[in-house]
């Protein structure tokens, strides 16, 4: 399928999805949301892809939020549907069966910050800016921000960001643990490719189980989480990759994973 508002490219085993409305700072309108939904559904089924990079086109924005011209038309009934559809897409991203790296190359505001939060890892450029400025629009985050931001940074900092609408720079986002790493904009995509290639060189079965085990954390109690971890650990031990990884260590050579 050819997309109008996003771009899909491939770099080795990495799919690169770029939101492509740079003149509107990549704001999320309903076309972007439905194309992202289609694209991530297809990528989930694509076994040739080990990692997905999600970024914004241009040098100014990752995503500057939900499209305010669409928000402006919402009534109460439509708004519930709007938030739930967005949440379903962001859940799809969070529950992808391969790691998703947000490459935050500028503004990540409102829905853009929430989109980055739904990814597994966040790499940012030095010029990136983060915030949940919905209170300035008479709103609160509706695509999971109150939940994911609170889990990722502490609840006091999430509260401060959401109820002041303050915008923070990449350095502050790094200090808060909101992003994993910060790079100069010119290096950002290559650093993301390096990380993606490193992940793609591991046992993909093990990587997938790790993503599942970490994601389940927010859904279940500590003891249920440990039990789930033990089950996934044991499944890994049934793979050829486990035999290969452990044998390669003992034989002092590099493992060659077949992903079986
Ligand atoms: N929805 C719709 N359009 C948006 C948008 C959004 N969230 N964010 C930016 N745009 C559009 C602007 O309307 C403008 O379009 P125009 O050229 O047709 O007028 C274009 O993108 C460029 O934005 P502009 O505001 O001129 O850039 P700037 O550098 O002066 O300011 C921001 C950048 C990000 C500070 C500013 O665009 C902004 O505050 N955006 C809204 C952020 C927000 O509240 N997001 C949360 C939404 S839930």
Image (cartoon, rainbow, N blue to C red):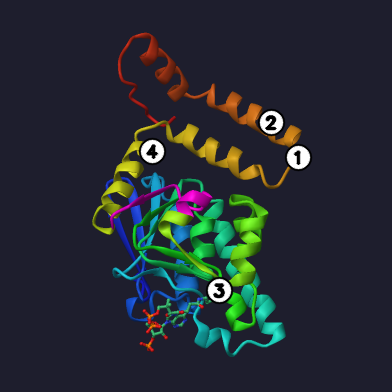
Residue 199: numbered disc: 4
Question: In front: mark 2 or mark 3?
Answer: 3
Classed neighbour count for the residue bearing mark 1: other residues with Cα under 10 Å, few (<14), some (14–19), many (≥20): few
Q: Marks 2 and 3: CB-CB under 8 Å? A: no
Question: In front: mark 1 or mark 3?
Answer: 3
Q: Disc 2 versus disc 4: distance between alpha carbons?
A: 24 Å
Residue where numbered disc 2 is placed: 226
Does label 2 or label 4 sit earlier along the sequence?
4
Classify residue 224 by image quadrant: top right
34 vs 48: above or below: below
Classed neighbour count for the residue bearing mark 3: other residues with Cα under 10 Å, few (<14), some (14–19), many (≥20): many
Please tell me whether mark 1 sits on a helix, a strand or a loop.
loop
Q: How many marks?
A: 4
Residue in view at x 46 percent, y 78 percent? 31
Residue closer to the observer: 105 or 160 = 160
Does label 4 or label 3 sit earlier along the sequence?
3
Residue 141 visible: no
Residue 133: numbered disc: 3
């Amino acid at each position: 399928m050819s997309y109008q508002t996003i771009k899909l490219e491939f770099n080795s085993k990495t799919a690169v999805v770029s939101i492509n409305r740079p003149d509107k700072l990549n704001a999320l309108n309903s076309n972007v949301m439905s194309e992202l939904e289609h694209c991530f559904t297809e990528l989930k089924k694509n076994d040739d892809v080990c990692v997905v990079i999600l970024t914004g086109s241009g040098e100014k924005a990752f995503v500057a939020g939900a499209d305010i011209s669409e928000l402006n038309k919402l009534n109460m009934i439509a708004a519930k549907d709007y938030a739930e559809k967005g949440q379903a897409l962001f859940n799809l991203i969070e529950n992808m069966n391969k790691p998703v790296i947000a490459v935050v190359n500028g503004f990540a505001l409102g829905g853009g910050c929430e989109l980055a939060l739904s990814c597994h890892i966040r790499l940012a450029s030095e010029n990136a800016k983060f915030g949940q400025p919905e209170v300035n629009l008479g709103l609160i985050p509706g695509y999971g921000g109150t939940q994911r931001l609170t889990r990722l940074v502490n609840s006091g900092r999430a509260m401060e960001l959401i109820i002041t609408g303050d915008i923070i720079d990449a350095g502050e986002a790094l200090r808060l643990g909101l992003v994993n790493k910060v790079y100069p904009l010119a290096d950002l995509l290559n650093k993301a490719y390096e990380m993606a290639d490193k992940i793609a060189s591991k046992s993909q079965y093990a990587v997938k189980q790790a993503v599942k085990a970490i994601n389940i954390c927010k859904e279940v109690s500590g003891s249920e989480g440990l039990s789930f971890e033990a089950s996934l650990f044991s499944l890994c031990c049934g793979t050829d990759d486990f035999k290969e990884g452990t044998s390669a260590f003992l034989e002092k050579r590099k493992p060659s994973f077949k992903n079986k």
